[in-house]
Amino acid sequence: MSEAAVCGLIMLVLVVVLLLAGAPVCISIGAASAVAMLMITTPEKALLVSAQKIFAGMNVFSLLAIPFFILAGVLMNNGGIAKKLVDCASLIAGRLPGSLAQTNIVANMLFGAVSGSGCAAAAAIGGIMGPIEEEEGYDKDYYAAVNIASAPTGMMIPPSNTLIVYATVAGTVSISALFMAGYLPGIMWGLGNMVIAGVMAKKMGYKRSEKVGFKRGFHMLIDAIPCLLMIVVVIGGILGGAFTATEGSAIAVAYALVLGMIYKNIKLKDIPKYLLETANMTSIIIIMIGISSIMSYVMAYTGVPVLIANALLGITSNKIIILLIMNIFLLILGTFMDPTPAILIFTPIFLPICQQFGMDAVHFGLMITFNLCIGAITPPVGTVMFTGCRVADIPIEQIIKKLLPFFAVTAVVLLMVTYVEPVTMMIPRLLKLV
């Protein structure tokens, strides 16, 4: 093993040690990268190259989509759009077993399709559905588990900030192709949750909701159409070539702002507060991308990805087993690391290995994202799980047992995403995006 490769491995070990010691992710990555840079070059060059890499990592046009989509989500969360989507979801799922829980799942999928955020969906939809379900006698652990398990569908169904981050790290990967590839896995995740929620609801004796009359149902659908049109405008415009994903994110903001003002839930005096909230959320992601660029440089310079690839291939050359090892590793990793830093660190390591087997970068992007989205609902660092528990006002340990069946069905969908290529690649290929 070369001296440079040793430096790269020391960097990865330092990241893990610092994370386990409780250091913030950004500090862990930055400190480990700084140590590695000082080991492979002079202090002056290390400082210069690090500054260049941080700037180059953040100076990417497509990353502008992230603050815009975050702002669109904030505006929708405060603009009354979530309630309209819940009403629409009740028309779709209102006659299924455990109809209120089924409505929660569909509403999370719809809200995710216009906000791209699992945490926003868990907070917005859970905040609306929780009191209704409690009033109808639903067990709090049950409806909180349903809300948490289904909220990450918004991180798969476009637009998705997580997929934008992956596209930035992976290089020449079409964001449009990634967005289209996310539809089937996201929908399958939601449908799997609906099956489990229905089975549990039957066992617990929850009845279906009363049938909604045609007149009331028609008015509910009409009210939801402007919200749903946002999906058509943004995704349709991106696919049709009318604008890029970044420009589409700005259009999403304008659409959400106008809609919120029409519904009289957003006032001009509140906009600075929403902008500040967006800036706080965006800064965490962008600085992490910049710092991770140093780590990516060190890994490329020291040949760590090649070293790990050779180690994996030394164990087995069987594609199925190697992908299974990756999935297990990413699932464990996701339990203590958020999706964004995990994608930034491990995409440069695992993507070249998968490409050796002929796996498309879009397919790999959905596989790693799906794995890490599962991590968002698992302890100890599951951000979506924390959000859902806070909304339901219950401790985390109280909900784990109810989440286990949802984990099982989601794991089955993950295996399909990994091994059945058409699940991710069919739609992008039909649209000639890959």
Image (spheres, rainbow, N blue to C red):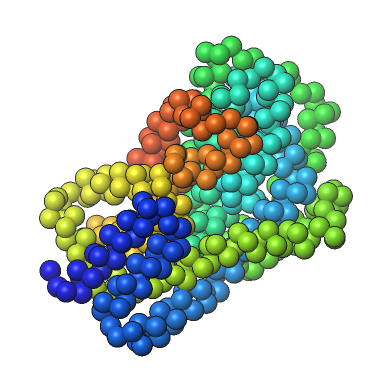
Q: Which residue is located at x 54 percent, y 31 percent?
A: 395
Q: Is residue 48 left or right of residue 259?
A: left
Q: Which residue is located at x 42 percent, y 52 percent?
A: 22
Task: Tell me, yes or no, if residue 140 can be seen here.
Answer: yes
Q: Is residue 181 above or below residue 136?
A: below
Residue in the foreground of this view, choosing between 363 and 426: 363
Q: Which residue is located at x 87 percent, y 50 percent?
A: 264
Report x, y in % for residue 331.
36, 44
Report x, y in % for residue 361.
37, 60
Q: Quadrant of the C terminus?
A: bottom left
Task: Tell me, yes or no, if residue 421 can be seen here.
Answer: no
Report x, y in % for residue 142.
56, 24
Q: Quadrant of the N terminus?
A: bottom left
Tell me the quarter of the picture where residue 72 sits: bottom right
Q: Is residue 56 left or right of residue 363?
A: right
Q: Is residue 80 above or below residue 89?
A: below
Residue sitting farthest toward the front: 21
Report x, y in % for residue 137.
67, 17
Q: Is residue 371 left or right of residue 110?
A: left
